[in-house]
């Protein structure tokens, strides 16, 4: 191997190491909000006062929701065509600042987006329920059903 090839190999190795270091963020890197399990969420709701935010659609909410939840949909879905003024982005001021906020959806994906949206808007104590209401129900926790 000549000197030039060795230099390129070393340079490539250094770049690869740097890329791997910066690309491998820890799983729980500071995203601004915390994701909690349904068991943790249940304990939190029993111990503390939380603003419980459901970001699913009205149809999903009417099928079942956690008691005390306030519905502010994140996005349209399931054939629903709510105006933009009915979605979280426009209604974010309805979520009280300075309170602890617990956010959920069906599986935890939309609520993670909503949690980040709240953090970006200056909310400081936001928790996403990982697994959403599906995990909540699977754990045997109570829900309100019907309208």
Image (cartoon, helix red, strand yellow):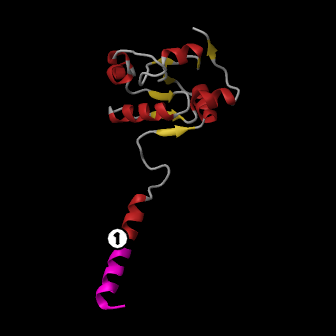
In this view, the residue in front, 45 or 120, is 120
Location of residue 72 in the rendering, given as x and y in whole percent from the top left corner: 43, 19
User: As drawn, which residue projects farthest toward the top?
Assistant: 147
Q: Residue furthest left?
A: 4
Q: Which residues are magenta?
A: 1-15
**Can you tell which quarter of the image residue 18 is in?**
bottom left
User: Is residue 129 shown above or below 144?
Assistant: below
Q: Position of residue 24 (x, y in %)?
A: 44, 59
Give the image location of residue 59, x and y in percent: 52, 15
Q: Quadrant of the C terminus?
A: top right
The image quadrant of residue 60 is top right
Point 40% across, 70% down: residue: 17
Q: Which residue is mark 1?
A: 15
Between residue 48 and residue 81, name the one nearer to us: 81
**Rendered-image quadrant of the N terminus:** bottom left
Magenta span includes 8 = yes
* Magenta span main SS: helix
Q: Residue lying furthest right in this view?
A: 140
The percent position of residue 27, horizontal first and vertical second, equals 50, 51
Q: Is residue 1 above or below residue 26?
A: below
Number of numbered tags placed on the structure image:
1
Residue at point 42%, 21% (across, down)? 76
Q: Secondary structure at mark 1?
A: helix
| Quadrant position of residue 137 | top right
Q: Is residue 29 left or right of residue 60?
A: left
Q: Is residue 90 magenta?
A: no
Badge 1, how many Cα within 10 Å: few under 14, some, many 20+? few
């Amino acid at each position: 191997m000549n000197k030039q090839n060795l230099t390129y190999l070393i340079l490539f190795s250094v770049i690869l190491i740097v890329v791997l270091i910066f690309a491998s963020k820890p799983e729980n890197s500071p995203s601004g909000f915390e994701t909690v399990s349904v068991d943790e969420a249940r304990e939190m709701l029993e111990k503390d006062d939380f603003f419980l935010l459901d970001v699913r659609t009205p149809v999903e909410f009417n099928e079942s929701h956690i008691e005390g939840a306030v519905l502010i949909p994140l996005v349209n879905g399931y054939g629903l065509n709510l105006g933009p003024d009915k979605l979280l982005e426009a209604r974010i001021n309805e979520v009280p600042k300075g309170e602890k906020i617990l956010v959920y959806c069906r599986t935890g994906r939309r609520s993670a987006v909503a949690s980040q949206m709240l953090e970006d808007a200056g909310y400081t104590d936001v928790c996403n329920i990982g697994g959403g209401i599906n995990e909540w129900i699977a754990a045997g926790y109570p829900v309100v059903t019907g309208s």
